[in-house]
Amino acid sequence: MVLTSYTIQPKKSCILNVCMPQMIVSTMGTPIRSGKIRNSKEKMRLIVAAFAGIVFGVFLGLSFPTLSLTKMNLPSSLFRSINLAYVDDKCSKFGTKSIRHTWASFMGDRSLSNGHHTLEVPKIWVPSNPRGAERLPPGIVNSQSDFYLHRLWGLPHQDPSIKPKYLVTFTVGIDQKDNIDAAIKKFSENFTIVLFHYDGRVSEWEQFEWSKQAIHISVSKQTKWWYAKRFLHPDIVAPYDYIFIWDEDLGTEHFDAEEYLKLVRKYGLEISQPGVDPSSSITWQMTKKRDGGEVHKDTVERPGWCPDPHLPPCAAFVEIMAPVFSRDAWRCVWHMIQNDLVHGWGLDFALRKCVKTPHQTIGVVDSQWIVHQSVPSLGNQGQAYDGRAPWEGVRERCHREWTIFKERMAKAELDYFQGMGIVPLNISS
């Protein structure tokens, strides 16, 4: 008895580097002896199996080439790792263009024309980019800025190449213009100058030549810490090694900014200030100028004021009238400044939280010193009411803000430690 036998041969159908076996059935006229098939049931099983193989092979061959990967819910990271060159080589019968088109269609909905075909290009999502810029290619991300001036004509690379390394800001009113003019002359061209105008009188500063290169920001009746929080974001001042945030009533006859910074580097100060003439009005013992030395980092205050000699106001302490911050220290301090507390009272006692070993990296430079003139110009921008002078309401708010800041800091630290399961003995230290 002669039967027709069916030999099943594999054929590859390739989808994205996965070659699936496709059952192709051919017939051969090889005789089979009747002795090898013992009964008719076995013969029927063989016929049914062969027919099922034919149907299954045809089904796979028709289905997989037309499968739409866009309907599959698979992570895009899987497809980014696919080596298309390998797919092209191993599964060339499927077609390179078809594979690339399928992959690109799955990855995004934007088109890229290669002259003959329009291919879909992948969407971009880079978690390491700054927050909000994840959809941009990293090469175009510019996360920092500066106060460098640029021309309105020519090409960008042809603009003047002077890029100051330091930043100094003064919060000013026109009544102090002569004092500010004298102070600005103590800062070299290595400094970008920013004036915050609280009285709205900006054009009157044009009489000074240096004013043409300064940055002028004017908002009526605001403090320097209000300005600092809004205009000195760490990513804006990132190009500057040191940031000076100074009041307008400082005498600078005995001060030179370049010499000052040499000492700051020499002694490794992250937060500092010039020594204050002891004859100036109310001044902390720590910030008073000392004779015979370049820098000091601690002092002896009144009895009972410093239970720990490494803590303010005996160490790790500068005042808020003339602080100087390194770039890294300012990045921390900016985040600590409260948006609604504009006078900055209490900050000087908390600055130490922004540096390592604060009793060593916070100090006062004695050989470059200033005079605090204590001109109540900003205080006079307050509002008189109930028979009180304008400055009285301003001073009252200063004290209230100090209390509010201390309470917020204490609560924030306590909440943190409790969340970590720690009960600190004294969070203030």
Image (tube, helix red, strand yellow):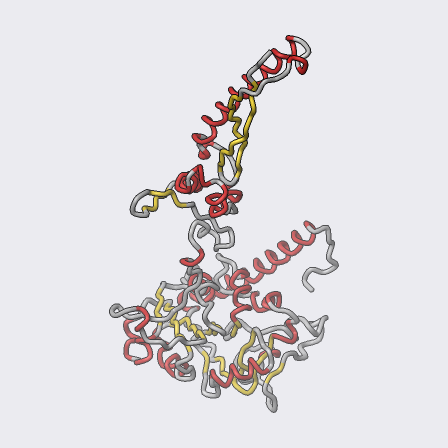
Q: Where is residue 129 in the image (x, y as percent from the top left)?
A: 48, 55
Q: In the image shown, does 125 or 231 lie closer to the viewer?
A: 125
Q: Is residue 84 visible?
A: yes
Q: Which residue is drawn at the image coordinates 60% and 78% (left, top)? A: 268
The answer to which image quadrant residue 170 occupies is bottom left
Q: Quadrant of the C terminus?
A: bottom right
Q: Where is residue 235 in the image (x, y as percent from the top left)?
A: 46, 63
Q: In the image shown, does 128 or 316 lie closer to the viewer?
A: 128
Q: Which residue is drawn at the image coordinates 58% and 80% (left, top)? A: 364
Residue farthest to the left? 153
Q: Where is residue 276 in the image (x, y as percent from the top left)?
A: 54, 82
Q: Position of residue 199 (x, y in %)?
A: 35, 67
Location of residue 298 with respect to 15 vertically, above or below = below
Q: Which residue is drawn at the image coordinates 53% and 43% (left, top)? A: 78
The answer to which image quadrant residue 278 occupies is bottom right
Q: In the image shown, does 93 or 257 lie closer to the viewer?
A: 93
Q: In this view, does 27 lie to the left or right of 191?
A: right
Q: Can residue 388 be seen in this view?
A: no
Location of residue 26 with respect to 160 vertically, above or below = above
Residue farthest to the top? 40
Q: Quadrant of the N terminus?
A: top right
Q: Report the number of numbered marks.
A: 0
Q: Which residue is drawn at the image coordinates 62% and 82% (left, top)? A: 296
Q: Is residue 102 left or right of residue 19?
A: left
Q: In the image shown, does 212 or 164 lie closer to the viewer?
A: 164
Location of residue 316 with respect to 65 vertically, above or below = below
